[in-house]
Every structure is written in C-alpha cells, then in structure tokens.
Amino acid sequence: MVKVVLKGITKRFGDVVAAGNVNLEIKDGEFFTLLGPSGCGKTTTLRIIAGLEQPDEGRVYFGDRDVTDLPPYKRNTGMVFQNYALWPHMSVFDNIAYGLKVRKVPKEEIKERVQRVLDLVKLRGLERRFPSQLSGGQQQRVALARVLVVEPEVLLLDEPLSNLDAKLRIEMREEIKDLQRRLKITTIYVTHDQEEAMVISDRVAIQNKGVIHQVGDPGEVYNRPKDLFVATFIGRGTLLEGIVEREEEPARIRVGDLIFQGRFSSDHKKVKRGDKVACVLRPENFSLEKPKGPSNLFEGVVEWTAFVGPYTEVRVSVGGNKILIDVPPDVKVSVGERIRVYIPQEDTIILPLEESP
Ligand SMILES: Nc1ncnc2c1ncn2[C@@H]1O[C@H](COP(=O)(O)OP(=O)(O)OP(=O)(O)O)[C@@H](O)[C@H]1O
Ligand SMILES: [Mg+2]
C-alpha cells in the first residue's frame, strides 16, 4: 500500500474555488475522510487524487512518486461512486470481472479472484444475478467488489452509502470499515454526514469552500475544534457570543449578564481582553449535579423538551440565551420549571469569532 500526499492543490471553476491550497498527508493504510457541506469541494479533491481532474496548482504524490501528470488508469486507484454505476445488462460476476478482463488477466485467475472478492463482500452465490435483482446494499457491495478485485493501492469512496436507507447505511459503514481494516488499504472516503465520518475514520479533514479547516482524529475535531466552522459543523451545541474579560486560562467570558470560565480551543495568543469570542457548549457535557472539577453554573427556565431515547433534549432560557442540554431519560423536566445546570470549565470551549483555516 501507499501514502497519499497532496501539496498545495488548488482547483477553480470560474469564480468557485473547489480546492483551495489543500495540503494533506494520508498515511499508508489509513482510513481518511473528507467531510464537509455540499459543494465544499470533496468530490473535486477526490477526483484530483484519482486523476479524473487536473489541479490548477499543486502536486499529488503516491509515496514518493509524483502522479500529478499520470492518467487515471496508471495510478492504480479504485473509485466507488455514489450511484454505484453498475452495468445493468451484466451479471454480478461479469460486473466484477470486467476490470480484470480489460487487463487481460487469464480466465482461470479471473474466476478465482472474483470468487475471493465475492467472499470478501459476502455475495457468494449471487454471481449470476443482475443488478436489478439485488437490494441497494447488495448493489453497493458489487460496486465495492468491482473495485477491490483489481487490488488498487488506494481506495477512493465518494459518498458510497448515500443511496441506502438509514439502517443499512449503519450496517454497511461497519462492513466497509471492517473490510478496510482487514485489507489495510489506504482509503479516502467522502461524506457530508458527520456521524458517519466520526464512526468510520482514523482521521478526518473538514473542508469548507474548498479549504481544509482542520485535520485530526474524530475525538480531536469534536473536542478541540480549531475554529467556529468546525465547532458548528460537527456535533450539536449552543453557540454564545461574548467578550473576553480575562485572557489567561481559565479565560473569563461575559455574555450579557452571564459570566463564565472556559478554555480556548485554538491558538488563543491572538485573543485579547475585550475581543469578541464564541463559546461552544455541547449538550451532553451538562449535568444537573455539580461536577468534581471547576465548573460553570447556568440557571434558567425550561422552554422546551424532547424525548430522544438515550436522553431528553431540553432547551433552557438563561438570561435571554437559549442553551441546549441533554438530561438523563429518567429525570423528569417540565416546561416552565426553573433548573440549574453545570458544565465543566474543561468543556466550555472558547473560539475566536472569525473562521480561520
Ligand atoms: N465541472 C465543473 N464545472 C463547474 N463547476 C464545478 C464542476 N465540478 C464542481 N464544480 C463546483 O465546484 C464546487 C465543488 O464541487 P464538488 O462536487 O467538489 O463538491 P462536493 O463537496 O462533492 O459536494 P456534494 O456534497 O454536493 O457532492 C461546487 O461549487 C461545484 O458547483
Ligand atoms: Mg460530491
């Protein structure tokens, strides 16, 4: 397998910057995900790696090899698209065997390799069927098998699960992850679904308007978002705009009449007393009892509740601010009630107001 390096990749379509100076190093055997909203440039970045699109600037490396000027068929990547693109008039076997036939692999070997990959994606026995006789999940497996059978060095997956229903998506993402672990194939996955990205990836890059805002493992981007875009794109939470009253940590922030303390999530040397900042409060970090370490207390009136299952989502009005908190399902909370909630200072994340990739 191989590592994939993007150096200063820029791609414009007219005024649109689909990739803005993208620098990434995807490790050998890593499961790496590009995550971002629709139109942020994920597919473009993936297509540049595959060689289906030429960058305006920058270079692509597989290991030490500069592949920027190589056509797609010389790059040894396998790409799975959102809509599978199976050939409807070909059986499962022929769909999977196609890439090997084109490469003039001997017949016996084709048979063997197709069988092996059918086992891998759990489709043995279905090789005579046509795509129209398969479920969505099975079709997706054929699409994967078709790519895996040629043993690519790099696997590129562009929202491969978006056509499946919610339950199947969860099953398939576990299967893909499992398969990737067994094959140890360097994999670059594209999705706009943050939960999917968190569950499936070793590391995630968060992209917006072509630009990569942060790269990190799921825990890092969730708990230490580098900027406001990342903090709001990933996870649920309340955003409060405030003024810095003390810049040394624990920093003190004023939001209207509220004063609380927290920690800076990014490079806070730029933030000074009197600066405007944003505080991100994750609902699951609140508790009804005072936590052990230093914490902030919020007191307010319950405006709205929703039973979600593992927790009840509660919106509390605190001095004119709306704060979203999760309460254990066995705790009864009613609209109109006054409650006190605590959040550790550790989990009170303070960020500069501007987005700074
Ligand atoms: N061939 C093209 N010609 C002109 N503009 C393009 C072309 N391909 C992509 N774009 C534009 O570049 C931007 C990035 O597109 P891209 O398809 O990479 O986004 P994406 O992150 O994959 O979005 P989605 O989640 O909707 O698939 C968009 O604004 C898109 O309209
Ligand atoms: Mg796309």
Image (cartoon, rainbow, N blue to C red):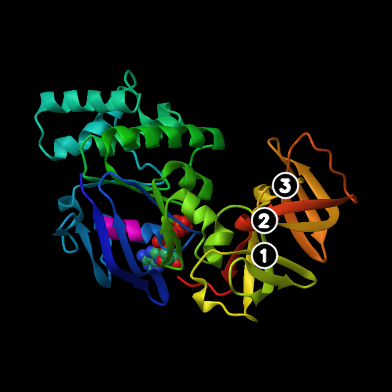
Q: Main SS type for the magenta part? A: helix
Placement of 137 over or under 55, stated as above or below: above
Percent of width and height locating residue 55: 27, 68
Is residue 315 toward the left or the right of residue 1 in the image?
right
Tag shown at residue 77:
none
Q: Is residue 42 visible?
A: yes
Q: Is residue 91 visible?
A: no
What residue does disc 2 label? 294
Tag shown at residue 261:
1
Q: Few, some or many C-alpha atoms within 10 Å of disc 1 (few <14, some 14-19, many ≥20)?
A: many
Marks 2 and 1, how far apart at CA: 9 Å
Circle nearer the N terminus (2, 1) = 1
- Name the residue at the top extreme: 125
Circle nearer the N terminus (3, 1) = 1
Q: Name the secondary structure under disc 3.
A: loop
Q: Name the secondary structure under disc 1.
A: strand
**Residue at (19, 47) in percent of width and height:** 76
Percent of width and height locating residue 22: 34, 66
The three-letter code of the residue at mark 3 reads Ser
The three-letter code of the residue at mark 2 reads Pro
Q: Quadrant of the N terminus?
A: top left
Q: Name the secondary structure under disc 2.
A: loop
Marks 3 and 2, how far apart at CA: 13 Å
What residue does disc 3 label? 287
Q: Quadrant of ligand 2?
A: bottom left
Q: Few, some or many C-alpha atoms within 10 Å of disc 3 (few <14, some 14-19, many ≥20)?
A: some
Circle nearer the N terminus (3, 2) = 3
User: What is the span of residues highlighted in magenta in the rendered image?
Assistant: 45-49
Determine whether label 2 and label 1 are within 8 Å by CB. yes
**Residue at (15, 52) in percent of width and height:** 74
Tell me where residue 66 sits by quadrant. Answer: bottom left
